[in-house]
Amino acid sequence: MPDPIYVLRTLRSSQQRLAALVNSFEATELERPSYDDDWSIADVLSHLGSQAEIFLIFIDAGLGGTEPPSNESFGPIWEAWNAKSSGAKAADSLAADTALLERIEAFSDDQLAHFELSIFGMEVDAAGLLGMRLSEHALHSWDVAVVFDHEALLAPDATELLVDGLGVLASRAGKPEVEHQSISVIASSPAR
């Protein structure tokens, strides 16, 4: 299990890369289609912002030893974000990202070491929850970056942490096909 401080630093780097990219955009660029099907760049940013807000609720549940919110409670959060203008989605997303990271960075060593949460049928510690956020953040940041640079790569620091969790990610995010398929992935950096 990776050190939660290392995962947090990697997440902060991902946030800084995305913020630098988004802050370089003209307003019209937010309307461009992202790599993520059916989502504009502003929509991807809205998703990241709403998820930052939801992760703050997860953090409070973990710190307080309470149950995390149910999936039904996410709807109003998503609706509020979807109703924003493209410019607000971008600006508010970066602000929500910053607020989430500042909240976690304010954890004491004891809070970080003893954090635990039962979420999505799993028991996660601080590194696990941060890894979930990093996976989402790094992949959706790439969804934006690749629109402007067709050779954009997933950030190497994030890839190093995420590559070994691809099996779990695929099993949770994959959509079953009628016909069985086998897929092999060979990574070169890091080598797997």
Image (cartoon, helix red, strand yellow):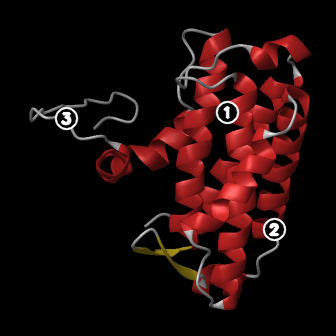
Give coordinates of residue 166: x percent, y percent. 34, 45
Q: Quadrant of the C terminus?
A: top left
- Hey, which quadrant is residue 39 in on the image? top right
- Label 1 sits on what residue type? Val
- Hey, which quadrant is residue 65 in on the image? bottom right
Q: Mark 1 = which residue?
A: 44
- Label 3 sits on what residue type? Glu
SS for dot 1: helix
Q: Farthest residue in the left direction?
A: 180
- Label 2 sits on what residue type? Arg
C-alpha gap between disc 3 and disc 1 = 26 Å
Q: Farthest residue in the bottom direction?
A: 65
Q: Mark 2 = which residue?
A: 103
Dot 1 alpha-carbon crowd within 10 angstroms: few under 14, some 14 to 19, many 20 or more: many
Q: Mark 3 = which residue?
A: 177
Lower position in the chain sequence, tag 3 or tag 1: 1
Question: Quick one: 104 or 39, which is closer to the camera?
Answer: 39
Give coordinates of residue 159: x percent, y percent. 48, 39
C-alpha gap between disc 1 and disc 2 = 22 Å
SS for dot 2: helix
